[in-house]
Amino acid sequence: MSDTAFWDWALTVYAGDGVPSVCLELQDTHGQNVPLVLFAVWAGVRGVALDEETAEAAVDISRAYADTVVVPLRSIRQRMRAVVGDMDDAHREALRTRIKGLEIEAERAQMEALAALVGGGSAEPEKAARDNLLAVARLWARVVPRNPLNAFCDALSERGFLRYNA
């Protein structure tokens, strides 16, 4: 497995028609962590059914990155959407772009840490992806948004992203 296999897969999936909006809905409306959601599906696509220990480790890693780096950076970037007092708009936008780059860099580091948790497996990919997704969502949030998560998997399946390609 290449060190960037998960990252490369995630970029391909995220570029799929309608996928970014579904991911952002899972994040903004349902409180899910997009890199964790993508990891759960990617592991399943690789034939890996996450055991309880691995799912917990994935959630712990994701919380550490989200709480310490990603969410604070995202909050700053979002606050800077609006005009900020006497700050030059061009400078504000340049700073927002740099902050977004740091946010993406932190998510990539999170994803590399998540990818290191799994190798290959022999589980049926689509079933493992769906089961993994529900398992990590259960650990991540008090309320599991089953319908949106299943709709996300359906959308990925329709686009061919739930088939394993080595």
Image (tube, rainbow, N blue to C red):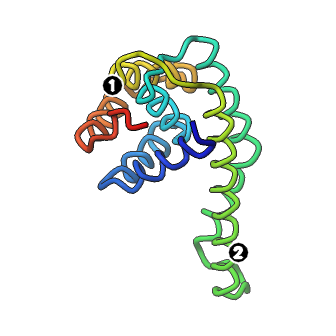
| Outermost residue, right side | 68
Q: Secondary structure at mark 1?
A: helix
- First in sequence, mark 2 or 1: give its number: 2
Above/below status of 142 relative to 7: above
Q: Which quadrant is home to the C terminus?
A: top left
Q: Quadrant of residue 29?
A: top left
The relative height of residue 166 versus residue 106 in the rendered view (above or below) is above
Q: Is residue 49 left or right of residue 64?
A: left
Question: In the rendering, at what x and y percent does residue 7 appear?
Answer: 55, 47
Contact between labelled residues 1 and 2, with CB atoms less than 8 Å apart: no
- Disc 2 target residue: 95
Bin the neighbour count of mark 2 within 10 Å (Cα to Cα): few under 14, some 14-19, many 20 and up: some
**Depth order, front residue of 39/5:** 5
- Give the amino acid type for the residue marked by disc 1 in the picture: Glu
Q: Residues within 10 Å of mark 1 (few under 14, many from 20)?
A: many
The total number of labels drawn is 2
Quadrant of the drawing holding the N terminus: top right
Q: Residue at x 63, y 64 (%)?
A: 100
**Outermost residue toward the left in this view:** 158
Residue sitting at x 49%, y 28% = 43
Give the residue number, with chain letter if any, for mark 1.
126
Q: Nearer the viewer, residue 87 or 124?
A: 124
Q: Secondary structure at mark 2?
A: helix
The image shows residue 152 at horizontal and vertical percentages of: 34, 37
Q: Where residue 72 sits in the image (x, y, percent)? A: 71, 51
Closer mark to the observer between disc 2 and disc 1? 1
- Residue 56, position as x, y percentages in the image: 63, 19
What residue appears at the point 64 percent right and 26 percent down from the top-left corner? 117
- Taking depth in this image into account, of 119 and 105 the one nearest to the observer is 119
Q: Specify whether 84 is left or right of 123.
A: right
Pick the front one: 110 or 71: 110
